Amino acid sequence: MKNEPKVVIIGGGFGGLEAAKRLAGKPVRVTLIDKKNHHTFQPLLYQVATAVLSPGEIASPIRRILHRCKNIEVVLGEASGYDLEKQTVKMKDDDEEIPFDYLIVAAGARHSYFGHDDWEDSAPGLKTVEDALEIRRRVLLAFELAEREAILTGKHDPLNFVVVGGGATGVELAGAIAGIARQALAKDFKAIDTRKARVLLYEGGDRILNAFSPDLSEKAKRDLEGLGVEVYLNSFVTDLKDGNVKVADEWVECDVAIWATGVAASFLGEELGAETDKAGRVFVNQDLSVPGHKNIFVIGDMVHLKQENGELVPGVAPAAIQMAQTASKNILADIRGEPRKDFKYWDKGSMATIGRNKAIVEAGRLKMTGFLAWLAWLFIHVISLIGFKNRLYVLSEWFWAYITRERSARLITGDAEELSDALRFLEAKPVVKELPEKKAKKPVKRKKATK
């Protein structure tokens, strides 16, 4: 037992958790470090943000997941760096160091504001449960404040929601917010008509969901517009301030802005001293080890690695899981004195949901749209959840939402001070140009100063 190699895993996301599971019961001692005590099923975070699900239905305590694994210990804390000579991981806020013989860095990524980190206060991204709860609070509070204004003054400003980014997260958020406004809340408010709320999606490229084939992207765009979402392509956001989004040279007023574009890998990649790309992803060897450090592996969203076709391995959950499997197998191969294997990504396909009964699925030559794709999306996400109880809860919530069109997780969290801030913001909301009419939509030229 004392001579067994020590494996330290940083991160309890899809990659880190899979690596731990693969090493469970093996002749190694594993320490998993995470600053949260739970694993979050990120593909369903947008449903927490739009009041379909509660956080506990998509998150599970890491200790509970690994409680049967006798050779694995879990440390709640945040890694801040390394001492590569001593082979230790440094912990933030104290002088503790955790030694390792092998290290797997799976710290993930956060949303990137392309050098404008101050924008985060105005337009939160969606990577954690806390992010989802903040977005949910802002979306629901926008309707409540509009109702309050209408009751007290007899009128209210139009409600406008802006989503920046046309990837899967942006599309799913935009479709879900449109569903809230046009269905879930339509009968609950008396002084305002929630169905008149506008949802605007700005995408810098020439199509949304560019990971899919052009025909599926176009189908998704039509489906979104059918739900009432206004999709603006070739439109780059150049500035953000409370209550306003600047698209090219035009300021657009909004009640809630959400950031759903751009990612930046954890700083822990750069701390390794390895070469990184502009997004902070580490260039790794084919066996996922860091050049010059055969006992250190980087997996998941932090990896810059090209496939045989020349394309980068995407930063998605299936890729992180497959990388974790390869890294753990290579550690065990070292222990047995066997040769390592190179990582090869198996693309199982992509899927995205647009709204009720609407989704797209692409796996090789297989393409699905509409209700069947939506059912496939439901099935894959349910079986991927950790724990039978979570699967049962999510199924029951989805079934209830489907037959009633209601959202059960519609709590506005926060204290009175936050509500007062929101009211002061409402009273001091600046006057800007009115939003362009739908027919006046024009592509917005890209500014050189931003991505």
Image: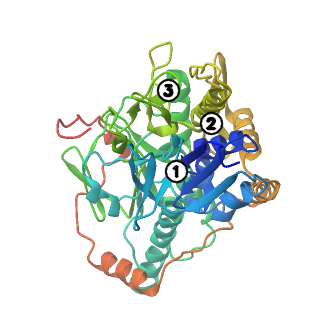
**Residue 8, image x and y in percent?**
55, 47
How many C-alpha atoms fall within 10 Å of the one at disc 3: few (<14), some, or many (≥20)? many
At 66% from the left and 31% from the top, the residue drawn is: 332
The residue at which mark 1 appears reads as 173
| Image vertical order of residue 216 relative to residue 107, above or below | above
The reply to whether residue 54 is in sight is no
Residue with the most extreme front position: 3
What colour scheme was applied to this rendering of the protein?
rainbow
The residue at which mark 2 appears reads as 321
- Going from the N terminus, do you reach mark 3 or mark 2 first? 3
- Going from the N terminus, do you reach mark 1 or mark 3 first? 1
**Residue 163, image x and y in percent?**
42, 50
The C terminus sits in image quarter? top left
User: In the rendering, which numbered label is found on residue 407?
Assistant: none
- Going from the N terminus, do you reach mark 2 or mark 1 first? 1
Amino acid type of the residue tagged 1 in the rendering? Leu
